[in-house]
Image (cartoon, grey):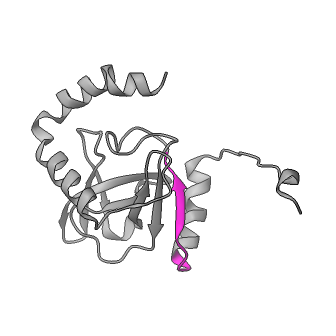
């Protein structure tokens, strides 16, 4: 079949319906590339632009971006900020507030991100991601102000 005969159809599904199917694939040992939706991981990851490469979670660690179920059928891709026993605290890079879950609620681990339409993945264990993450995490006390400035300048110009 020639490429000119191939049609691409885009379909959208509610996360509550779609993400459990992703989790099944991860549980079977597959990797999944997921187009990101939402703004909670700004400034590094952007809605409908960037993609995450997910695997079945191994041992959760602080700083790791994970796909977690924080409420029944409510999933987030956020960074782990604290682990105490079975209790996990998550925060999106673009968020001030946190979410809570159990270790068993972590359904996937992001091992990298395809950002800004690039074919080369930014690995979460790579120097670039680690340095950016460390700096952004340290900026938590002033993050609210930085995000407000970014919303008025950088993010506004990227959506027009």
Determine which quarter of the picture holds residue 87.
Answer: bottom left
Q: Residue at x 39, y 73 (%)?
A: 57
Answer whether residue 35 is magenta in the image.
yes
Q: Is residue 15 above or below residue 147?
A: below
Q: Is residue 15 left or right of residue 151?
A: right
Q: Is residue 87 left or right of residue 7?
A: left
Q: Is residue 88 left or right of residue 7?
A: left
Answer whether residue 26 is magenta in the image.
no
Q: Is residue 20 above or below residue 5?
A: below
Q: Position of residue 110 (x, y in %)?
A: 39, 63
Q: Residue at x 46, y 66 (%)?
A: 54
Determine which quarter of the picture holds residue 127.
Answer: bottom left
Tell me the quadrant of the picture where the N terminus can be found.
Answer: bottom right
Q: Position of residue 21 (x, y in %)?
A: 61, 64
**Closer-to-camera residue (50/58):** 50
Q: Is residue 67 above or below residue 39?
A: below
Highlighted magenta segment, given as a residue range: 27-36
**Closer-to-camera residue (138/107):** 138
Q: Position of residue 76 (x, y in %)?
A: 41, 51
Q: Position of residue 53 (x, y in %)?
A: 47, 63
């Amino acid at each position: 079949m020639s490429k000119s005969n191939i049609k691409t159809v885009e379909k959208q599904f509610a996360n509550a319906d779609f993400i459990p199917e992703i989790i099944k694939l991860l549980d079977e040992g597959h990797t999944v590339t997921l187009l990101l939706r939402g703004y909670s991981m700004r400034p590094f990851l952007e809605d409908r632009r960037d993609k995450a490469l997910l695997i079945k979670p191994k041992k959760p660690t602080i700083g790791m971006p994970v796909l977690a179920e924080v409420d029944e059928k409510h999933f987030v891709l956020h960074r782990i900020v604290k682990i105490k026993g079975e209790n996990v605290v998550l925060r999106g890079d673009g968020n001030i507030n946190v979410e809570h879950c159990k270790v068993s609620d972590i359904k996937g681990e992001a091992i990298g991100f395809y950002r800004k339409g690039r074919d080369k993945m930014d690995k979460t264990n790579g120097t670039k991601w680690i340095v950016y993450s460390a700096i952004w995490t340290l900026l938590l006390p002033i993050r609210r102000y930085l995000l407000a400035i970014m919303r008025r300048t950088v993010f506004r110009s990227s959506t027009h």
